[in-house]
Image (cartoon, helix red, strand yellow):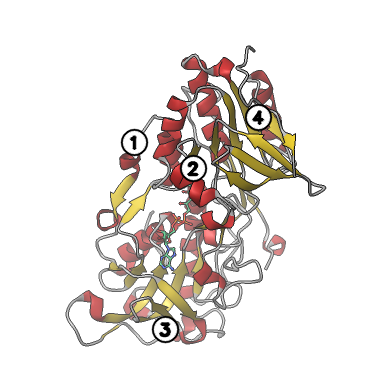
Amino acid sequence: MALCMKGILTSVSVIGRQIRTLNSTSSLKTKIWYSTAAKPAPQTSESPGPGPVAKKSYKFVIVGGGTGGLAAASFLSRKFGQGHVAVVEPAEHHFYQAMWTMVGGGIKTKEQSMRTMASVMPKKVDWKKDRAITFDPENNLITTESGTNLEYEYLVVAMGLQLNFHALKGLTEALAEDPMVCCNYSYDTVDKTYKALQNFKCGNAIFTFPNTPVKCAGAPQKVMYLTEDYFRKNGKRDQAEVMYITPQAVIFGPPKYAASLRKICEERDIKVHYKHTLVEIRHEKREADFQIEDGEILTFPYEMIHVPPPMGPPDVLKASPLVDETGFLTVNKTTCQHIKYPNIFGLGDCTDIPTSKTAAAVAAQTGTLKKTISSVMHGHKPQATVSELFLIYLLPIDMKIFSPFIYMHRKVRNDDALH
Ligand SMILES: Cc1cc2nc3c(=O)[nH]c(=O)nc-3n(C[C@H](O)[C@H](O)[C@H](O)COP(=O)(O)OP(=O)(O)OC[C@H]3O[C@@H](n4cnc5c(N)ncnc54)[C@H](O)[C@@H]3O)c2cc1C
């Protein structure tokens, strides 16, 4: 490959369906409690004031109106009807985040990934445009930023992952000031990626992976394959050294798929660096520092760099009694029921369910959640249904095919369950 002379590669070491069995509101009895660890809140009531905003007590409160929260809101509001389900969600807009990979690749516009929250919120739901700030599970209560107390009989927590841009030195400034630093993980930055591909001239095109839990662990690679393809089709491939730099020891979790991906990287001349953790971006010099195992820092110059930010559980959740030391919502991985509070359930990226953190996993968990809630409301012990869902990505090998994923479900027996 005839490469340009500028800044290539050199690493310089410098430093659904309705829940058929669910009880209706009127038939709810105290016997629904599978465990007595939590008391049911009073039945739905109105407090003084106009309209649904004044309502403070619900059968179901859902925290988070993203993929998981809206899925739960949809089936619960269909079953229980108007006024019994509240969704606490501060955002004015809902985003189809999976589309951001395609926005970064120039296939979609970012506006196509966005809907107003009002348009996707199920009609029978009371949307509280507010942020949950405290959880009081002993009293079946959450408090919101505006000072409202919301009481619930059942709580579904689906708050997603928090993006911690500030936790990586130089990232916030680099994203604000350097057009060649991009990130598909946020609506605010996703449109930088395709512009960076278009403006790329010559040098290292670096794609990194964070040293934290990550949503859609395939996305940091998908953007790379799309970029590589773009370079080929636009006569830039010979001027680019494409690199995937990851803190992990493998390119992808399941060995079968890792082998295929390694082969693709070989065929496409993509250099993979393992056990390299990105620790700083110095955009004034267009350099990125990576720490390797022995603590040494390796500096890579870049012409463009794609950086998924460090991620973690939301601060509000971390500060609540609903988590363990990891900060993730502790739920039974086979039932989505909280391990301590039986009237609390979790969905999606904010839980400690050991699946990939993806919308596809949320889809599988939603089916589980329906069954679990039904069991709990009937006073039965929830049965393990789906466990250990592995999500495997079919990466865009051909580029015409962009099949995002397939699932492999492994049913486990109850005695396999973690909790
Ligand atoms: C670039 C990218 C590519 C992806 N590609 C894929 C893919 O190909 N396939 C796939 O299956 N998945 C993909 N995903 C992952 C998928 O989008 C997420 O896993 C999924 O959205 C998780 O759903 P969730 O409900 O847990 O969280 P989210 O959908 O993120 O929703 C969380 C919601 O909680 C709200 N919230 C946060 N804090 C509070 C609070 N204190 N009070 C009230 N509400 C709060 C937020 O505003 C947000 O609306 C991708 C994600 C990204 C970023």
- Residue 3 horizontal/vertical position (percent): 62, 16
Q: Which mark is residue 29?
A: 3
Residue at 47% over, 16% down: 233
- Residue 305 horizontal/vertical position (percent): 55, 36
| Amino acid at dot 4 | Leu
Which mark sits nearer the N-terminus, 2 or 4? Answer: 2
Dots 4 and 3: beta carbons under 8 Å? no
Q: Is mark 3 within 8 Å of ligand 1?
A: no
Closer mark to the observer between disc 2 and disc 4: 2
| Residue receiving disc 4 | 261
Per the model, the C-alpha gap separating discs 2 and 4 is: 22 Å
Quarter of the image where one finds residue 13: top right
| Residue receiving disc 1 | 109
| Residue receiving disc 2 | 183
294 left or right, relative to 319: right
Closer mark to the observer between disc 2 and disc 3: 2
- Residue 235 horizontal/vertical position (percent): 49, 14
Above-or-below relation of 39 to 76 = below
Residue at 80% over, 47% down: 293
Per the model, the C-alpha gap separating discs 4 and 1 is: 27 Å
Residue at 68% over, 58% down: 413
| Amino acid at dot 2 | Cys
Closer mark to the observer between disc 4 and disc 1: 1
Residue 247 visible (yes or no): no
Secondary structure under tag 4 reads: helix
Q: Which mark is residue 165?
A: none
Tell me the quarter of the image containing the C terminus: bottom right
Per the model, the C-alpha gap separating discs 3 and 1 is: 50 Å
Residue 89 visible (yes or no): yes
Per the model, the C-alpha gap separating discs 2 and 3 is: 50 Å
Q: Viewer-proximal residue, 320 or 67?
A: 320
